[in-house]
Amino acid sequence: MNVGGTGEPPGGPEDVAGRADAGAGPAGDTPGDDPGAAGGDGGAPRVPVLPGFREMALRRMSQDRGRLMRELAARRQDAGLSQTEVAARMGTSQSAVARLESGEADVRATTLERYAAAVGTEITWKLQD
């Protein structure tokens, strides 16, 4: 999970799902393309990109997010709540809750926390090595 950020990549959910160039990374990910790199406008030097690291991190986050959403959906069902009831508590639509529960979308941490609160639980964040 993305702790301290928005939980969503710069280009939104479409930036992660459905990218044909998943191995290439977004524009500017190659050394020398960053105008803020050393020799540019005086910004800090760019940290080198490790091949495959972004994809590995995205895959792990996707698996963790899917597991979290399955657990939250089970808690919703245990509480006897429908997707429509949860949606009303969150101020969104039932279809948005269904998409959230599918675990496929790259959602913001605040959205996950709102869902958890709507089903009567909370998410605690922990960093691991």
Image (cartoon, rainbow, N blue to C red):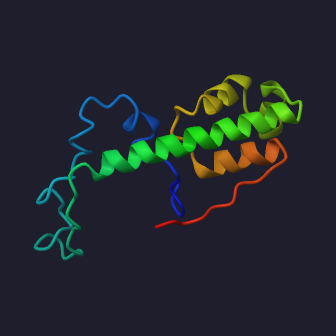
**Quarter of the image where one finds residue 102:** top right
Left or right side of 102 for 22: left
Left or right side of 52 for 125: right
Image point (83%, 26%), residue name: 82
- Estimate the x, y position of residue 89 in percent, counting from the top left: 83, 38
Image point (52%, 51%), residue name: 7
Image point (60%, 64%), residue name: 126
Residue 20 in the image: above or below residue 48: above
- Estimate the x, y position of residue 11 in percent, counting from the top left: 39, 42
| Most distant residue in the right direction | 80
| Most distant residue in the top direction | 95
Total labels drawn: 0
User: Could one spot residue 57 in this view of the protein?
Assistant: yes
- Estimate the x, y position of residue 71 in percent, counting from the top left: 70, 40
Left or right side of 4 for 9: left
The answer to which of 63 and 15 lies nearer the viewer is: 63
- Estimate the x, y position of residue 117 in percent, counting from the top left: 79, 48
Left or right side of 96 for 16: left
The answer to which of 12 and 124 lies nearer the viewer is: 124
User: Could one spot residue 91 in this view of the protein?
Assistant: no
Residue 98 in the image: above or below residue 10: above
Image point (78%, 27%), residue name: 83
